[in-house]
Amino acid sequence: MDSATLYRTQTAKPLSEFVVALAAAGQKRGFFIHNETTMEMAHTFGKHDVKVGEEFDLHMIQICKPEKAAFSLSHNPERAALMPKFITTFTQNGMTQIRMLCYGRTMVEELVDDPDFASSLEESYHAIQKTIEEAL
C-alpha cells in the first residue's frame, strides 16, 4: 500500500448499535472513541445553524489508543498530522456503511521521515480494522 486506501465494509446493524459494538470491541484493544458527544455530524452542523435533512446520519468517529498515541507523539510530534483516525459511518440502502482512510507506508515515510512510525501506523490500521470487524 503505497498511497492511501479506503477501507470499506457494512453491517445490517443500525448505526447506533454498531457504534456501541465498536466502543466495546475497541476497549478490548485499548481504543476509545474520543469524540462520542460530537461524532454525529447533524448535531455538529446544527450548532453552526446549518440544517441537514432528517435522514442525514453521518457519524465521524475519532478512535484513539491514548497510551500508544502519547508515546508516539512524545517521540516525534511531527507524527500528529497523520494520527487522527476517523471511522465514518452512514446509512445507505438500509445498511450501515463504514469507511476509514488508511495511509500507505510509502506515503507516510515521504510525509514524515520516520520509518518506525510507518510500521506503527500500519499496525494501528490493522488493529482498528479487526475492531470494526468484531463490531459488525
Image: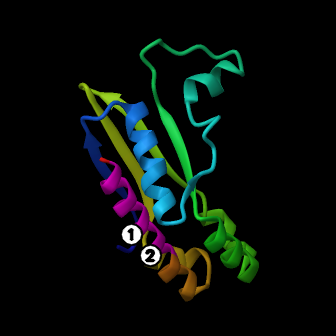
Q: What segment carries the magenta color?
A: 121-135
Q: 61 above or below 80? A: above
Q: Regarding mark 1 in the picture, which secondary structure is present there? A: helix
The color scheme shown is: rainbow
Mark number for residue 73? none
Question: Which residue is labeled 2 in the image?
Answer: 123
Q: Nearest the camera: 130 or 7? A: 130
Amino acid residing under circle 2 = Glu
Residue 111 point in image, percent of width and height: 59, 74
Q: Main secondary structure of the magenta part?
A: helix
Taking the image as shown, residue 68 lies to the left or right of residue 8, namely right
- Quarter the N terminus occupies: bottom left
Dividing the picture into quadrants, the one containing residue 106 is bottom left
Question: Which residue is labeled 1 in the image?
Answer: 126
Q: 54 above or below 34? A: above
Q: Measure the C-alpha gap from mark 1 to mark 2.
A: 5 Å
Dividing the picture into quadrants, the one containing residue 101 is bottom left
Q: Residues within 10 Å of mark 2 (few under 14, many from 20)?
A: few
Q: Residue at x 42, y 16 (%)?
A: 55
Q: Are marks 1 and 2 in contact (CB under 8 Å)?
A: yes
Q: Nearest the camera: 68 or 43? A: 68
